[in-house]
């Protein structure tokens, strides 16, 4: 099968590498600009324009593609979905890669066009195009040296730097959001490399349900901090946030116009509400992928720091 991957940064490249390493599927990388460094890896890079005026051209470039994996968002992804449907693409996976969609509020400050993309895909599903949302919870890379940005993941998220989410491992600091029951919130997590492996394996499944959930580990935020303390060999300064203190942090950031602090507070509130947690990782039982547990991953990530 010919698989198109829309995007050329960290997660897209990990998915592409997993497909080329572990399957016989052919891939093309859809990029807004030439990427000679990716072409040097033997990958076919197709320069595209996602604007509506170029929809016919994009559909032409998708001719013969059976599956599209999107790692782009916003209006560009809507244009890609429309072009994929026009080209007769059989399957489409939108840029989800977080918690289950049903757990997200509406309106959602962290949406970045995801709701519209899913609505568009439901429409095209009635016309024969399958879709699935790859659900992975929180990426381990949030807790890497340099955060997700160091792996070129979440570059447009505004909250991908080290220390933006729950742990600042360099400074031995932690934020622990508490759920409505007063207990530390649970999170499900997966490494980006394992996400690539799960996605690659899922391409060969005979049917795609609306969600394919993968998971490398699941724990509450207190356990997350304990693991970080073990890895660093030192206690962390811990701040616990209940509903009131999280809302206060958001209102303070909003009143001062600090966008990044608003995003940090919103993400903390989302974590407390259970947005990044799920009980049944159905994809884990459907494919032969053995994901890395969080403590082993964190030890490896920080061994030279």
Image: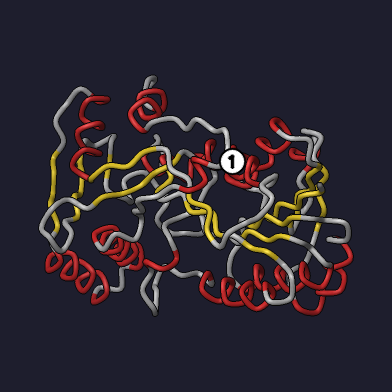
Residue 79 sits in quarter: bottom right
Percent position (x, y) of residue 257? 30, 73
Q: 31 or 243: which is nearer to us?
A: 243
- Specify whether 91 is left or right of 180: right
Q: Which part of the image, by quadrant, shows the C terminus? A: top left
Percent position (x, y) of residue 146? 41, 39
- Specify whether 249 is left or right of 10: left
Percent position (x, y) of residue 18? 65, 36
Q: Is residue 102 above or below residue 1?
A: below
User: Can you name the residue that lies furthest to the top here?
Assistant: 304
Residue bearing mark 1 = 196
Q: 280 or 300: which is nearer to us?
A: 280
Residue at 28 percent across and 36 percent down: it is: 169
Percent position (x, y) of residue 110? 42, 67
- Specify whether 125 is left or right of 156: right
Residue at 35 percent across and 24 percent down: it is: 299
Q: Is residue 123 above or below residue 74?
A: below
Q: Is residue 158 above or below residue 173?
A: below
Q: 228 or 99: which is nearer to us?
A: 99
Residue 147 sits in quarter: top left
Residue at 76 percent across and 46 percent down: it is: 35
Residue at 63 percent across and 58 percent down: it is: 93
Mark 1 surroundings within 10 Å by alpha-carbon count, few (fewer than 14), some (14 through 19), many (20 or more): many
Residue 88 sits in quarter: bottom right
Residue at disc 1, secondary structure? helix
């Amino acid at each position: 099968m010919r698989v198109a991957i829309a995007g050329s940064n960290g997660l897209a490249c990990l998915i592409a590498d997993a497909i080329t390493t572990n399957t016989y599927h052919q891939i093309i990388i859809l990029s807004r600009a030439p990427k000679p460094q990716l072409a040097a890896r033997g990958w076919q890079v197709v320069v595209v324009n996602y604007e509506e005026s170029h929809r016919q051209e994009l559909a032409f470039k998708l001719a013969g593609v059976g599956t599209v994996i999107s790692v782009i968002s916003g209006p560009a992804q809507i244009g890609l979905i429309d072009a994929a449907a026009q080209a007769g693409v059989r399957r489409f996976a939108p840029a989800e890669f977080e918690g289950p969609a049903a757990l997200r509020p509406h309106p959602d400050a962290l949406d970045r066009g995801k709701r519209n993309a899913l609505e568009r895909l439901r429409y095209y599903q009635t016309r024969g195009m399958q879709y699935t949302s790859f659900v992975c919870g929180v990426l381990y890379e949030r807790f890497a040296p340099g955060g997700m940005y160091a792996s070129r993941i979440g570059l447009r998220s505004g909250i991908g730097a080290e220390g933006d989410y729950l742990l600042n491992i360099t400074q031995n600091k932690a934020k622990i959001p508490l759920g409505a029951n007063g207990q530390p919130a649970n999170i499900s997590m997966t490494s980006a490399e394992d996400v690539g492996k799960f996605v690659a394996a899922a391409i060969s499944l005979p049917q795609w349900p609306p969600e394919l959930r993968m998971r490398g580990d699941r724990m509450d935020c207190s356990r997350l901090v304990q693991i970080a303390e073990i890895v660093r060999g030192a206690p962390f300064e811990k701040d616990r946030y209940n509903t009131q203190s999280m809302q206060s942090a958001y209102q303070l950031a909003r009143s001062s116009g600090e966008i990044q602090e608003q995003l940090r507070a919103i993400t903390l509130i989302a974590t407390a509400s259970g947005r990044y947690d799920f009980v049944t990782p159905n994809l884990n039982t459907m494919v032969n992928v053995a994901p890395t547990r969080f403590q082993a991953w964190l030890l490896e990530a920080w061994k030279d720091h």
